[in-house]
Image (cartoon, rainbow, N blue to C red):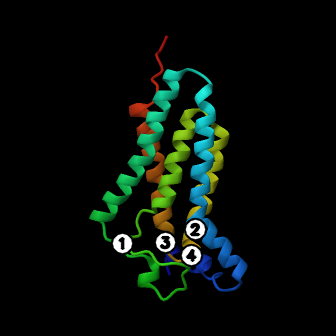
């Protein structure tokens, strides 16, 4: 058996063992992203009043470009690349149904692009918390039976690249002295 399926079956194997575990997996797989958006929004709002307004505006453009770019890239890839979700191709338990293609994980890509933008935004502590949260969401989505590990890995890589490209294109430029 390949590693992708082995990881999927191992994580997915805990579903149904306890209603508490299923509830925790469901929270992280489907709802935790909204808490992350709220936290990032509060930090963004708090940072309006600190530092240069011009730098803040450039970072904000990069942040918006990062998350919008991640969402658009996810939909584009899913449109051109057919990848059924494991719950539709394997006989495994799952917590909720999704009908879109599996690759890449949009939740993971969104959180990792947000984390990368926040890293360049200057809030490295929040960025590392977001990276850890994105990984937690990815693991929960594998456990929930709606993603393969390769979908999560693809979301991580593409999310980081999207955040970096958005910062490079729209973020503040350092002038060499």
Q: Earlier in the sequence, mark 3 or mark 1?
A: 1
> Percent x, y for residue 132?
64, 54
Res 29 label: 2
Q: Residue at x 71, y 83 (%)?
A: 18
> Percent x, y for residue 114?
52, 46
From the viewer's perspective, is residue 14 above or below residue 4? below
Say which of 7 and 41 sits in front. 41
Measure the alpha-carbon separation of dots 2 and 3. 13 Å
Give the SS element for disc 4. loop
- Please rate how many residues cluster around mark 2, counting C-alpha atoms within 10 Å: few if below 14, some from 14 to 19, many from 20: many
Q: Earlier in the sequence, mark 1 or mark 4?
A: 1
Q: Residue at x 46, y 63 (%)?
A: 105
Residue tagged by mark 1? 83
Horizontally, residue 130 falls left or right of residue 61, namely right
Residue tagged by mark 4? 144
Residue tagged by mark 3? 148
């Amino acid at each position: 058996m390949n590693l992708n399926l082995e990881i999927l079956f191992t994580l997915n194997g805990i579903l149904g063992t306890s209603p508490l575990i299923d509830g925790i997996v469901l929270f992280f797989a489907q709802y935790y992203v909204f808490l992350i958006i709220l936290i990032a929004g509060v930090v963004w709002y708090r940072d309006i009043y600190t530092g240069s307004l011009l730098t803040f505006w450039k970072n904000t453009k990069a942040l918006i470009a990062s998350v919008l770019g991640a969402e658009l890239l996810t939909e584009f890839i899913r449109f051109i690349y057919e990848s059924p979700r494991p719950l539709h191709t394997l006989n495994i338990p799952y917590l909720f149904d999704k009908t879109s293609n599996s690759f890449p994980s949009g939740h993971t890509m969104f959180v990792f692009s947000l984390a990368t933008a926040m890293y360049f935004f200057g809030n490295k502590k929040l960025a590392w918390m977001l990276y850890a949260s994105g990984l937690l969401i990815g693991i929960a989505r594998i456990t929930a039976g709606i993603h393969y590990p390769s979908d999560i890995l693809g979301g991580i890589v593409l999310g980081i690249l999207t955040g970096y490209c958005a910062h490079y294109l729209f973020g503040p430029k350092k002038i060499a002295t």
